[in-house]
Amino acid sequence: MIEQQQKLMLSPYMEIYELVIPKDNLLRQIKELVDFSFIYDELLANYCLDNGRNAVPPIRMFKYLLLKSIYDLSDVDVVERSKYDMSFKYFLDMAPEDEVINPSSLTKFRKLRLKDMNLLDMLIAKTVQLALEKGIIKSKSIIVDATHTKSRYNQKTPRQVLQEQSKKLRRSIYEIDETMKEKFPDKNTEDSLEKELKYCKQLIDVVKGNEEICSYPKVQEKLNLLEESVTDDMEHLETSKDEDAKTGHKTADTSFFGYKTHIAMTEERIITAATITSGEKTDGKELPKLVQKSKAAGIQIESVIGDMAYSEKKNIEAAKEGDYELIAKLNPIITQGNRRKEDEFEFNKDAGMYQCKAGHLAIHKYFDKRKKDKKNKNPRMVYFFDIEKCKCCPYRDGCYKEGAKKKTYTETIICDSHSEQVKFQETEHFKEKMRERYKIEAKNSELKHRHGYDVASSSGLICMEMQGAMTIFAVNLKRIIKLMNKK
């Protein structure tokens, strides 16, 4: 059964909250700012209304998850802290003497109550609506970018992850008491997840049996993480790795295994939309969704600011149709051609041909129709040079390849859309707007380094979307409060 969380608190100790929680406490400000009753309305259908014992109120369970995201804590640690941290209990609408939940309830809440919900869009829309009501969002521009999150397993099997976590736990214990080595079970040497889980459970039992060792925070934190991993992997014995995660590239030389979160944000640094994909997806393809979701959340868009990943032809044309500016530089290959040594070839406008560094003109040219027929590909003009002259040219080193049967130079022909974008990106308005792009880099850093968004907390795209929803919700609320306090 489910009951409304908003009920009269009759505890004689309620006045403690007024004494120990200052007015500028973050959780107090969030509690006063947000009406969380929408959570009850959204989750009502996922509960039985007339059978069974009373469930923990869904608003309280949701707030536990929000605390996890704000302070980057494990299930066990957020419950443990709520035992003694009065600001946590106040935020959770609990009396000071109330008992806390069992940490396993959070896992069930995520899997049973939050399933089949579009949590990401719903929570972002709520914060955007709140920011608009408070008059915080005034700009009509959104900044777009993507940030990567590494898979929890990072291309490692669950057994390898368990091995690493149990190793870290043992090390932290050895720093305190090396004699514990004699009490630990024998390590698993077989390539078996089941046996690795059995070893970890035995290790956990031994550590928990020593109250003195468990009293050290560095041991307790690593113990909690190992316990959480064991519980999760017991339910996924058939999983060898995160099957939804894929390999993506940050640069030409560096890659990651995991997910991408594509973000749209106002100039006031309020996130207005997000989509979450596997790591190999390109940034530019997600732009139409980000624009659509931002508008659905209530944002007026006059310009979209992004890096060159968003300047593909489809996005330029979509900006015209959507009546907004696309502040994204074109790839130099489009504006300059794919030229590594531009000074070696110059266009002779009188002859209508390119000439090489030695002054030799191309002998003929032809229009590459195959490129024109390809979707989103600009057509090209190919210029041919006299190969016999190239063989004896004083500048042939690095230009002419020995044994080559032809020497060509290719020029990309800019389409009308690209031509207009080239002119636009030279204007002062474009350059001024482009200076706002740095803000989203700082937002990505905040998500990763303050809220644990650099590594997925669980496996699977659905769990990643849930993590993204809670993290972005927390970050937006913090930003709204900060801007309100500046007024």
Image: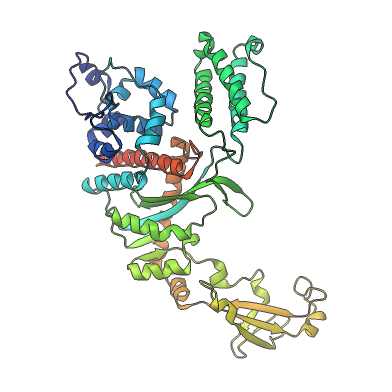
Kindly tell me whether residue 201 is visible in this rendering.
Answer: yes
Q: Quadrant of residue 350?
A: bottom right
Above or below, 258 against 169 in this view is: below
- Marks counted in the figure total 0
Front position in the image: 218 or 433:
218
| Horizontal relation, residue 259 to residue 395: left or right | left
Is residue 357 among the parts visible in the rendering?
no
**Residue 289: x %, y % from top left:** 39, 58
Nearer-the-camera pick, 344 or 454? 454
Say left or right for 338 vs 214. right
Q: Is residue 448 above or below residue 413?
A: above
Rendering coords of residue 2 (x, y %): 25, 30
Q: Position of residue 349 (x, y in %)?
A: 59, 87
Q: Which image quadrant is residue 478 in? A: top left
Colour mapping used in the image: rainbow
Residue at 38%, 39% in the rendered image = 470
Taking the view exactly as shown, the residue that stands out farthest to the front is: 51
Viewer-proximal residue among 125 and 147: 125
- The C terminus is located in which quarter? top left
Residue appearing at x 64%, y 81% in the figure? 382
Tell me where residue 399 appears, x and y as whole percent: 75, 73
Q: At 61% across and 38% down in the image, what residue appears? A: 156
Work out whether 440 lies above or below 2: below
Q: Is residue 182 left or right of residue 334?
A: right
Q: Residue at x 54, y 15 (%)?
A: 205
Q: Is residue 132 left or right of residue 195?
A: left
Q: Is residue 384 above or below residue 90?
A: below
Q: Quadrant of the N terminus?
A: top left
